[in-house]
Every structure is written in structure tokens, then in C-alpha cells.
Amino acid sequence: MTENIKAKRSQKKGAKEILRLGEKALDYRRDILSADQVERLESATTALKVVLSNKIIYINELEEKAEKVDIELKESGGLYYHKKGWVENVEMLMVAAIVVIGIRSFFVQPFIIPTNSMYPSFFGMQPNLYEESKDVPNLFERSIDKVILGASHYRLNVESSGNLYLVLQNGGSFRSAKATFPNGRFFVFPNTVKEYVFEVGGKEHTLQVPAEFDFDTLIAQKFAGIESLRDLPLIVSQDQGFTGNRLKLSDKNYQKGDIAIAFDILLGDALFVDRMSYNFVKPSSGDPAVFRTGSIDEFNRKLGTPVRNFIGEDKYYIKRLIGEPGDRLEMKVPDQIFTNGTDVRKGTPGVLYRNEKPISGKVAFEENRKRAESLALNPEADNPMNYPGYRSEGLLSNREVLTVPRKADPKNPTGLNGYFMMGDNSTDSLDGRAWGFVPENEIIGRAFVVYYPFTKRWGFSN
């Protein structure tokens, strides 16, 4: 007579796994199994489930019932039995992908800001320059900065002796190139970058940076304390066997092993974009809106908008929504701006009006207005909030009234509402002033939270 011995926890766990696979095979393969196979598998799984539901489970009974399910699964289980790990993994990945795509398509979408057109509300890529070689971080310190700030480290190591020059590329400061491992997207796919060529002692040195990063200004500030490379001396003559137009960056005699320049590029703000709200409420003035650019050019062609630039590509942009359908927008430049010596190389500062009143309701609106007004009074005034003041140009030239198109307007052939977008940092923003209006069908959602990097801007956005 067989002795009744209580089943161990591991034996119960194994039996439960066989039962799960039996029920799964029934769910997924019922329609392709014969009626007899379905009946036998259902009977075996039911019997095993009854045993597992008992308060006291004996091993002989458990093994008997589990073996019957095993026998039926070997005949009817298909890919689900014996359990195949790759099947389970593929199923898990497919479910995860469906969930992620669903969330991204209907609820929230991640977006990383590459440029500083929305600074200081949102940061794009920012440089952190190391003035002295002794300040350059070690590998551990760079790893910490990478995790917390999303910082990527760059440096130019000198491999010969001599003065430092920047070699011009077809009249410009850089050439476009393709970055591969490890600097490509996701470390795999080639990525377009800016490639700068430096020359020291007749030897070329190259340095690649992201295409959106303003390396020109960093070079000018590092080596000359100025804002523009155009103010550096141009060297045309041959020197040390090297021919080509160059900008002389430094009189310092660099030695092999020196670091000519070292800096970090801090990741732009990573946002979550609310894709759901605009299904129920209309976009409103002041929203930091994310939109696609694919049909903007065609939309403005149909409207006859006298744009200065066409975008010519389908990308995601983020700008501040300035004007809603039917709004009247106008930029008014204070008279004093033209007579008090204000630097207007990055555009003429002005106060932005919406429907005959200074635009208001957001920090960016108020601070840009205050900055334009303070520049009119004193070009040297402090700017603690760092908003540069809105700039009058393009479709918002001084005193020109711009009406945002409505689909109800009989003169609007598109059948769509339009919206007008500007960057909070309008001195460095290519926005609606240059390329016109955004059609309503291209607006994705509103940026509502900065989730990375972990700085004082982390949290809900304005």
C-alpha cells in the first residue's frame, strides 16, 4: 500500500505550472483541436485543479493528475508544451510593445528638446566648459554626471606641437558627417553630426558634436572671449605644409598630450507630452505645444503666407502657442530702441500684443515683455530671469498686424484652423515668424512635465 506523503511547495509549484500551460493550450488551440482532444485535456486539467484546491495535497495523487495533463499536452499542446522559453519571451515583448505604443499614441509621449529655442523655460543641449585641464573630470565623475545630468564628455587631445587653428570647410566652420558606434543613435544607427577639423603643427585633429549643438559660440568664448567666430583672424597662407583657410584660435604653443578644449554637453530637457487633453479641449495661448512640421509648408502655401523660410522636413518641434484662430498679433518696438544703442544683431526687441493688449498669462510672456521694456530704458540693464525679450522680424515685423487663420474664414482654402508658435528665446528660435502657421492637425500635445535630467526644472512645466 502506497504511503500518503504531503506534497512539497516545489512540487505544488511545478503542478501549477503544468496546469497553467494546460489552460493556455485550451484557450489558444481550442479551435484547431479535435473534440476528443479538447474533452481529454479539459478533463485532465479540471482533475488537477481539484487536487490543487485541496487543503492537504498528497504527492501520489498530485503526480498522477499532473502526469495525465502532461500526457495530453504532449499530444495537444503544440508550441506551448513542452514550455518553450522563446515563445514566452516573444509573447511578453509583444504585449509590452503594444502597451508602450498605445500609451505613446493616445496618452503621453516622451520628447527631448535638442535646441535652446525655449530657453530658459526649457533647456536644450547646454555646454559645461572646463577652463583648466586639471578640472577635467575622471571616468567615475563623468559616469555620475551622465546618470544625473545626461552629460556627454568631449575633448580635443593634441597629438603634435604648435598653434591651434580651426580649418574652414567650404567657407563654414564644420562639415556634416555620420557618426557610428558608439556615438550613433542608440549606439547602433548612424547619426548626422557636425565635424570640426582643427590643425596643430600641420596635423589635423577632428572632433564631432551633435548637429543641434552650437559649438561655434563655445569655441569663440573659450579662445577669444567673444560671441562669434567671424571676429577671429583668418589665415589664408600656407604654413608648415598645410594649405587651406583657417581661423587662428590661440597663440599658445600646444605640446603633444595637451588638452586644447574639454567640455560636457548636458542633455536637453526630457519631457512627457500630454497627447490626450487636446482631444477634449482646444489648444490655448500659452501652452508649450509639441507639433509635427510635415504639412506646415503646404498649409502656408495654400494660405499664401509670405514666409521667409520653408521647413522642408517632417520633425517634432516644441514652441509656445502664441496665437489661436482669429487672434490678431502685433509686435511693437519701443521708439527708444532705435536711439539708445541697443544691440539688435539678434533682432529688434519688441512687446508682443495679442488682440490689442500685451500678451499675458504665462511667465515667459511677462518676462519677455519686461525685458523688452527694460532694454528700451537701459541697454545695460540686468536680466536676472534670462528671458531675452521678444524680437520683431519676419511675419511679426514692427507694427505689422498678423491675423491667425480660422477654418470658417471664406478666404481660408485649407478647411483647417491655424495656430501661431514662437520660441520663448526668440533671439535663437526659428519659429512662426519665419515659416508661418501650424495647422491644427499637426499639433501633438502639451508638454506637462520634465522627467529628466534631475535639475531644478524637474517636475511640472509652465
Image: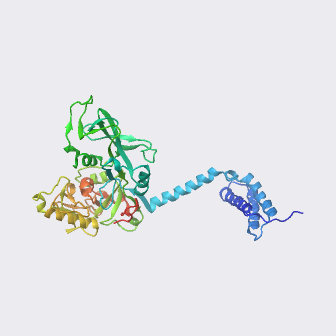
* Residue at image location 37% in from the left, 68% down from the top: 281
* Residue at image location 39% in from the left, 56% down from the top: 149
Q: Tell whether 49 sits left or right of 399.
A: right
Residue 438 visible, this angle: yes
Q: Tell whether 209 sits left or right of 348.
A: right
Question: How was the colour assigned to the protein in this rendering?
Answer: rainbow
* Residue at image location 45% in from the left, 48% down from the top: 186
Q: How many labels, in total?
A: 0
The residue lying furthest to the front in this view is: 134
The residue lying furthest to the right in this view is: 1
Q: Tell whether 397 sits left or right of 161.
A: left
Q: Tell whether 334 sits left or right of 145.
A: left
The residue lying furthest to the top in this view is: 241
The residue lying furthest to the bottom in this view is: 55
Q: Nearer the viewer, residue 423 or 239?
A: 239
- Quarter placement of the C terminus: bottom left
Compared to residue 314, the image places residue 275 above or below, namely below
Q: Position of residue 165 (x, y in %)?
A: 26, 38
Q: Position of residue 232 (x, y in %)?
A: 20, 42
Compared to residue 284, the image places residue 244 above or below, namely above
Instruction: Using the rendered view, name the quadrant where residue 35 is placed.
Output: bottom right
Q: Position of residue 1 (x, y in %)?
A: 90, 63
Residue 352 visible, this angle: no
Q: Position of residue 244 (x, y in %)?
A: 25, 33
Q: Nearer the viewer, residue 9 or 260?
A: 260
Instruction: Using the rendered view, name the quadrant where residue 20 is placed.
Output: bottom right
